[in-house]
Image (cartoon, helix red, strand yellow):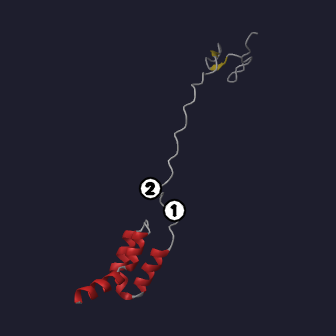
Amino acid sequence: MEFFGILIIGALYFLPTIVASSKNKQNTGAIFALNLLLGWTVIGWILAFIWALTQDANPQPSARSVAVDAPKSLPPQQAPAQRKCPDCAEMVLAEARKCRFCGHEFNA
């Protein structure tokens, strides 16, 4: 009979840790430390219990999340045709009439 009494008292003492663990809190370890070290002060127990009941600011994604299909691969795009500017040697579009780097005008 004594064993069950100690078991019940222990469960009540660590209730904030049990609640935090069941809610998959990010700070379960910190709540356990607060509960273990300051739970005997009653104020520490109340703080740990309130902390265990609050919602996380950035909740962890659950393992039961819906699987998202991978995006379908797109056909490879061809790079636009380019040519080298004879003055500055920079690559410009083949359709360009004027080099955007040095201002060289191409013949039509």
What's the amino acid at mark 1? Asn
- Nearest the viewer among 33 and 59 is 59
Q: Nearer the viewer, mark 2 or mark 1?
A: 2
Residue identifier under label 2: 63
- Nearest the viewer among 29 and 22 is 22
Image side of residue 75 versus residue 64, left or right: right
Disc 1 on helix, strand or loop?
loop
Image side of residue 72 versus residue 96, left or right: left
Relative vertical location of residue 85 with respect to residue 25 in this rendering, above or below: above
Q: Residue at x 65, y 15 (%)?
A: 85
Labelled disc at residue 58: 1
Report which quarter residue 87 is drawn in: top right
The quarter of the rendered structure image containing the C terminus is top right
10 Å crowding of disc 1: few (<14), some (14-19), many (20+): few
Relative vertical location of residue 107 with respect to residue 91 in this rendering, above or below: above
Q: CA distance from mark 2 to mark 1?
A: 15 Å
Relative vertical location of residue 78 with respect to residue 13 in this rendering, above or below: above
